[in-house]
Structure formats: structure tokens, C-alpha cells
Amino acid sequence: MFSLIKPLLFKLDPEAAHNLAIKSLKLNYLPKSFFNVENEEMLEINLFNKKFPNPIGLAAGFDKSAEIYNSIFKFGFGFVEVGTATPLKQYGNPKPRIFRLENDKALINRLGFNNDGSQIIRKRIISNKKKGILGVNIGPNKETKDQAEDFIKGFKAFYDLVDYITINISSPNTEKLRDFHHDEKLNLLLQLINKEKKNNKNDIPIMLKISPDIDDRMVESISDIAVNNSVSALILTNTTNTNRENLKDSKREELGGLSGKPLENLSNNIIKKFYKLLNRKIIIIGVGGVDSGKSAYNKFISGASLIQLYTGMIFKGPEIVKNIKKDLITYLKQDGVKNFKEIIGNW
């Protein structure tokens, strides 16, 4: 079905097409059985005291305001991350702010955390009981006077509702947000989050979403700080401000974060560096360029225990998860592997 309607969707402005997809998914009409695959038990993994039916997740950015996550679970995702949620509702940056680079299988976005705000999102999650492993990605409002305090507000809004919380310090579209990659600022932020966990007697897993635009020294310092502050997982990586020189599409010079296939190798290299340093002390969630069984396989052998996608689904449609799982299972059988966990970090 997607192959039939894709040409029509791609004639629409990308944000208009996205809004249409959200409205369609609210109808919740697709049967879950359509996306089932055989031998999916080969993709099961237990992490954070949760059983993931498979390691393929939807990245934050698609269901920004937690409107359709239960419909998305039907596509076969092992987990879904909503957001980025900010304390107050905000419009984001001026339009146009999403650009398809069809020749590069990529997107550039400068959305700026457009969402309905934490309190509305909280009410939605309460009223629409999750049917799978659900995480929420939190960030600060654009006009805030204290970004760290906004993260604390986000934590307080969701810690008792979801399965994990992602601290997003990596979007290139919010001024000074990436400053949290620096030692002192990151350490203080994570200490504040851990203090809130202790105050609320809660042990919810905390994920930290990292930029791909960092050097080796920052990889080392972030690894140390994450371990010392009991971070449960690193999400590697968010979109990039760089990597434009080999792009073919005329929209390549648009400002914003680049996602999709051009991010794949950059993400994999960052994953390998963190995996080697962390020595399995922290779980890695790999993001960037996942759109096939082969690209997923490469994320796992690079060191990711879970993966996420978003741009791949824009270009290949909702069957992408089913197709990735089928191909992964085929590769594992060819390798004589009983469960994908055996290949993690085996590059």
C-alpha cells in the first residue's frame, strides 16, 4: 500500500505529510497480525528489567506529543520513544523546517522541539495505556532561563508513567543545548537527575542522547561521566550538522540536523568508540541510517544492543520493521546464531 501512495505523499510538504500520517494512525485500523514474523524469538532481549520482543525501536521525533504510540506498536516495533517533550507547549522554529533529500535517502530538520508540552502529553499517556515498552524524550523550552531546570521538570512529569526517560542534549536546533556535552555541565545535570530519582524513590532507567559531532576526547569524558552517574544507556546518535560534502540533493545546504543514510557510517563509528571504552558497562542504542536488515546488523556488530529508526520509515513505510526483522533472522540463521545478542560488538 505504501508504495502506491508514496508518490502522492512525497508531493506534499514533508511536515504536511507527517501530520497526515499522524491523523491516519489515530484511526488505528491496521491489524497487528499483518506485521508478524516467524522466529521473532531470535530477536528477544532482556534489558532494564524488561523483555523487549525485538530490539527495533521508533526514535523520538515521529510521535512528538504521544498521540499514536499504541498504533505504532502494531507495526512490530519492540519499543517506542515519544517526544521531545518540553515543560511548556511550543511551536518550534518557523516553517518550512523539514526537507526531504530524496536522492540521499535523508532528511534535514530544524523543527526546534515543537510539541504540546509535558502536562498535555502526560495526560495522554495516562488516558491511553501503553501496549508496549514506552520511553519519553525530554528537553528544554527555547525561551527557558534554566535548561537544567527544564530537564528536571520533564523528569518529574514522566518518571512514574513510562519505562525509561531520555535526556536529549544533542539536538542541533536548540541554542546551547549541546553545551551539556561538556564535562562540568553534563556531570551537574546527571547529578540533579539522580537526586530527583532518589527523592522520588524511583529507579527509572535514564538514557542520554548524544550528538555525532563530537571528538575522541569528548567520547572519553562522556563515557566516564555516564558510568559515574549510573546512566542506563547512551543513544548514539542524534542528527548531524556536518557530513554534507557528498550529498547529491540541492537541499543539502539547508540549516538543521541531517538524518538518514548519510549518518549511518558516522553513527556506527561513534558506536564502536563508545562500545570499546564502556566495555559493556552501559547499554548502547544505535540510531542513524537504519533502513534494512543489513544496516541493522551493522549497528549490532558495532556494539548496539538496541536500535532506533525514523527517517527509514519515511522513505520505506510502515512495513520497514517487518522487513528488517525477516532479514535479520535470515542473516542470523545463515551465521548459525540462535539470538542476535551473540553478534553484539563482533565487528
Image (cartoon, grey):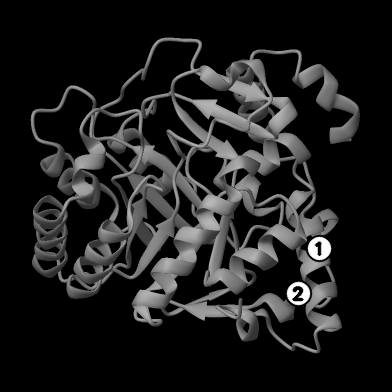
On the image, numbered disc 2 is attached to which residue?
40
Real-space CA distance between mark 2 and mark 1, rounded to the nearest whole angstrom: 8 Å
> Which of the pair 214/80 is nearer the observer?
214
Which mark, by number, is residue 238?
none
Residue 163's spot in the image, x, y percent?
A: 40, 63
Q: Quadrant of residue 175?
A: top left
Along the viewing direction, whichever of 220 and 307 lies nearer the viewer: 220
Q: Secondary structure at mark 2?
A: helix
Question: Is residue 131 visible in the rendered structure shown here?
Answer: no
Circle 2: residue type: Glu
Disc 2 and disc 1 in contact, CB within 8 angstroms: yes
Q: Is residue 95 above or below residue 154?
A: above
Quarter placement of the C terminus: bottom right
Task: Using residue 9 as the reference point, say whether residue 62 is left or right of it.
Answer: left
**Can the viewer see residue 341 in this picture?**
yes
Measuring 64% from the left and 78% from the top, which residue is drawn there?
44
Q: Residues within 10 Å of mark 2 (few under 14, many from 20)?
A: some
Out of 29 and 221, give the one closest to the viewer. Answer: 221
Q: Which label number is shown at residue 36?
A: 1
Occupied quadrant, residue 143: top left
Q: Is residue 331 left or right of residue 77?
A: right
Q: Please name the amino acid that badge 1 sits on.
A: Asn
- Residue at (23, 73) in percent of width and height: 230
Q: Is residue 109 above or below residue 287?
A: above
Extreme top residue here? 95
Residue 277, picture quadrant: bottom left
Q: Position of residue 209 (x, y in %)?
A: 36, 52
Residue 25 location in percent, x, y?
Answer: 67, 35
Q: x and y percent of residue 53 in the render?
A: 63, 72
Q: Residue at x 28, y 45 (%)?
A: 169
Does residue 179 appear left or right of residue 62 in this picture? left
